[in-house]
Amino acid sequence: MSEVALFRAIILRALQDAGGNTGMSQDGRHDRLVVEAQNWFREMGSDFQKACGLAGIEPEFVAERAKWRMQDGYHRLYDPSERAANAA
């Protein structure tokens, strides 16, 4: 696997995690992973910038697409308190 493909896979995994598709049971670890992934896209920090650069993708494009996809109902931004409120 090339370095570009590796970092594109990392970004894709983060998109899946941010949308709540972590592959874990819905517990505290799941909730933390979702929030961390969402924050990674929102904050656009140095790790995010580096991953996008190594993937050959503009960070602004990735962040905007992540936000758009998570808000369109297919992958909504995840709020763990919403799940707790719905369970009550």
Image: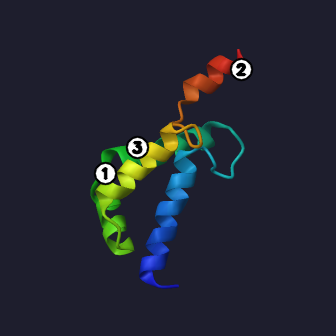
Q: Residue at x 31, y 59 (%)?
A: 59
Kindly state the secondary structure of the residue where label 3 is placed.
helix
Front residue (pair 4, 23): 4
Does residue 5 sit above or below 72 in this rendering?
below
CA distance for labels 2 and 1:
32 Å
Residue that lies at the very extreme toward the top in this rendered image: 88
Kindly state the secondary structure of the residue where label 1 is placed.
loop
Q: Residues within 10 Å of mark 2 (few under 14, many from 20)?
A: few
Looking at the image, tell me whether mark 2 or mark 1 is earlier in sequence order.
1
CA distance for labels 3 and 2:
24 Å
Q: How is the image coloured?
A: rainbow
Q: Residue at x 44, y 71 (%)?
A: 7
Q: Amino acid at mark 2?
A: Ala
Kindly state the secondary structure of the residue where label 2 is placed.
helix
On screen, residue 35 versus residue 46, left or right, reads: right
Does residue 20 sit above or below 8 in this rendering?
above
Q: Position of residue 45 (x, y in %)?
A: 29, 53
Q: Amino acid at mark 3?
A: Asn
Q: Quadrant of residue 25?
A: top right
Q: Quadrant of residue 28?
A: top right
Q: Residue at x 67, y 37 (%)?
A: 27
Residue that lies at the very extreme toward the front in this rendered image: 72
Q: Are marks 3 and 2 in contact (CB under 8 Å)?
A: no
Pointer 2 residue: 87
Pointer 1 residue: 44
On screen, residue 24 versus residue 78, left or right, reads: right
CA distance for labels 1 and 3:
8 Å
Q: Position of residue 57 (x, y in %)?
A: 35, 67
Q: Residues within 10 Å of mark 3 (few under 14, many from 20)?
A: few
Pointer 3 residue: 39
Q: Residues within 10 Å of mark 1 (few under 14, many from 20)?
A: some
Looking at the image, tell me whether mark 3 or mark 2 is earlier in sequence order.
3
